Amino acid sequence: VKGEDVIHENWHVISSKEGLRHPFITVTMQHVQLPDGRIIEDWPIVQTRDYANALVLNEAGQAMILEGYKHGLGKSSWQVPGGYLEAGEGPLDAIKREVLEETGYTSSQWEQLGRFVVDANRHVGTAHFYLARHARQVAIARDADLEGFRVLWISIHELREALRNGQIALIAYATNIALALLALESKSTNNR
Amino acid sequence: VKGEDVIHENWHVISSKEGLRHPFITVTMQHVQLPDGRIIEDWPIVQTRDYANALVLNEAGQAMILEGYKHGLGKSSWQVPGGYLEAGEGPLDAIKREVLEETGYTSSQWEQLGRFVVDANRHVGTAHFYLARHARQVAIARDADLEGFRVLWISIHELREALRNGQIALIAYATNIALALLALESKSTNNR
């Protein structure tokens, strides 16, 4: 019983000081005490903005892929649409806005696939993932981002292949696509 | 053609300066030029250590879950084993070492599920994911980490449920599990 108490007890943050401040990222150095009494003088906690992504399927069941450069990767990667939540904005509103802005598409069928903290030790932020089905174009795409991209429509089979062969090189897009594939399979099994 | 050239052209890093240095994290401020000529004075790039995780299945096909506190989350979460790569260590060697150290288990069947950069804009690091099957215990677990944890064995069905209901609260573990579930399904389909 003692063991389990220790396992689930949270670390105690004794104090914290600013390590770095920037509009898109802060680093805080925490002085923490572990449940067993050990002290760590400077545990870095990083905070970037929370973001939302979505796998978007059109009426034909094809998946939307954006192809373009991402500076965190340093090269081009297949992506799914998404972006940072604005101040006070919920994740579902954010992803609907991002998909419309980036691609001109909208959907009336949004499914939440999960929310996950990005780094087990440093925090970094929270990622929200969605699946949008039966999407249709209602506006002209307006590229509000720093990076240009082009839109591809691929089959679910091609999407699975892309996940295996390295064309999806960033973890958020991979997670979103993998969770969406599992959700779609679960639906198709239930419909059999 | 002009459009596609721009899309795939990398950003040019004009100069960079140190924003923060710590044994587990560095932040570099980059002065970058975009392909369209725009200049950004201070684009933060974060570098933490690369890490590897694995979904480990035993001879009975049950999945290994570690339950314990993670300070990046601020509470307990279901996890899969893994940890940071040591200097000069490859990801497969790292995950074999971590699984043995953390749990006392070993496997002769390791499958690479993918490698992904953690943040599309800030980099952060690279995550490597594996599936280990037919694992067996060959040593006493030695908890070398700061956080205590306990080991659970759950069914593949329970694993899918955990992914949906929020028990897997960190993105690396969710990605690893989702990719492993897709790989296992693909195998079982091929064997039909």
Image (cartoon, coloured by chain):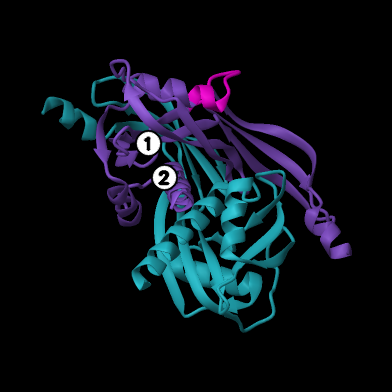
Chain colours: A purple, B cyan
Foreground residue, B130 or A160?
Answer: A160
Instruction: Estimate the x, y position of residue A176 in percent, counting from the top left.
Output: 45, 42
Badge 1: residue crowd in 10 Å (few <14, some 14–19, many ≥20): many
Secondary structure found at label 2: helix
Instruction: Estimate the x, y position of residue A117 in percent, counting from the top left.
Output: 59, 42
For disc 1, the marked residue is: A80
Secondary structure found at label 1: loop
Foreground residue, B91 or B3?
Answer: B3
Which chain letter goes with mark 1? A
Of the two numbered discs 1 and 2 on the same chain, state the one appearing first in sequence: 1
Q: Is residue B16 left or right of residue B149?
A: left
Q: Residue furthest front?
A: A192
Q: Residue flagged by tag 2: what amino acid is it?
A: Ile
Instruction: Estimate the x, y position of residue B55 in percent, counting from the top left.
Output: 53, 64
The verdict on a common chain for dots 1 and 2 is: yes
For disc 2, the marked residue is: A177
Q: Residue flagged by tag 1: what amino acid is it?
A: Val
Q: Is residue A109 magenta?
A: no
Residue at point 43% right, 63% down? B185
Residue at point 47% right, 26% down? A95
Q: Is residue B28 above or below residue A39?
A: above
Is there a contact, CB below 8 Å, between mark 1 and mark 2?
yes
Q: Is residue A88 magenta?
A: yes
